[in-house]
Image (cartoon, helix red, strand yellow):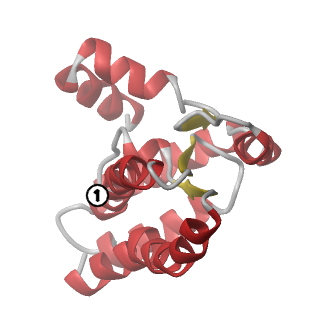
Amino acid sequence: VTIEDARYQFEVNLFGLARLTQLVIPYMRSEGRGRIINISSVGGKVYTPLGAWYHASKHALEGWSDCLRVELSTFGIDVVVIEPGQIKTEFSDVLAKKLEATSANGLYTEFARKIVQANEREYPNGTDPQAIVKLLLKAVRAKKPKTRYAGGRMSKLAPRARAVFGDRFFDKQVLKMLK
C-alpha cells in the first residue's frame, strides 16, 4: 500500500470528519448545545490482516472522538461514536478489489486470496444496515446519549474476546478464519 493510499484512507475516515466538525463547532458553541456523531467501525477496536491503514484510521477516529468528547463537554456538546460490525454492504466487494489491486502479485498474494474468500463467506451473514440506522436514531434521540453505540455482527464479541483473551489469542483466531 502506498503512502498516498494510506493518506487517502485518513482523509476519508478522519480528516474529512475533522474538517466538517471544525465548521460546525462554533455554531454549536454559540447555541450552548449540539451533538456530533462519528461513524467508526469495530475495526477501530480490532484488526484484520492487510487492513493496517483502514484500522489505523478507525483507531485514530476513536481516539480523536474521545478527546473531542471531553473537550466539548463544557460547551454542552455531545460526541458519540457509532461502531458497526459486519454489515451487509458492498464493503466486502470494495475490499476484495482493493486487495486484488495491491496484493495480486507479490508476497501477500495467497494471504490476500484467503482474506477475500473469508470475506465472501462471512459478509453475507452480516447484519442488515437498518440495525445501524436504529443505533444512529438512538444516538440522535437520546437526552443523554451513550458515548458509543456498537451494533452488527461481531461488533461486541470481537473486541470483548480481544480484551479478555489478549492479542495473541485474537491473532490466532483471525488467522484461523483464513484457513
> Residue 9: x, y in percent?
38, 74
What count of labels does the image hold? 1
Decide which of 57, 99 is in the foreground and name it.
Answer: 57
* Quadrant containing the N terminus in the rendered view: bottom left
- Residue annotated with mark 1: 56
Can you say whether 99 is above or below 121 in the image?
A: below
- Quarter location, residue 142: top right
- Quarter location, residue 167: top left
Q: Classify 10 Å Cα crowding around label 1: few (below 14), some (14-19), many (20 and above).
A: some
Kindly identify the residue that appears in the image at 80 percent across and 41 percent down.
134
Q: Indicate the amino acid at tag 1.
A: Ala
Residue reaching furthest to the bottom: 4
Decide which of 99, 62 is in the foreground and name it.
Answer: 62
Can you say whether 60 is above or below 125 in the image?
A: below
Q: Secondary structure at mark 1?
A: helix
Can you say whether 118 is above or below 68 in the image?
A: above
Residue 29 horizontal side relative to residue 173, left or right? right
Kindly identify the residue that appears in the image at 82 percent across and 45 percent down.
130
Kindly identify the residue that appears in the image at 33 percent across and 25 percent down.
173
* Quadrant containing the C terminus in the rendered view: top left
> Residue 152: x, y in percent?
65, 35
> Residue 162: x, y in percent?
31, 23
Decide which of 109, 148 is in the foreground and name it.
Answer: 148
> Residue 163: x, y in percent?
30, 20
Can you say whether 96 is above or below 15 in the image?
A: above
Residue 21 horizontal side relative to residue 102, left or right? right
Kindly identify the residue that appears in the image at 42 percent across and 46 percent down.
43
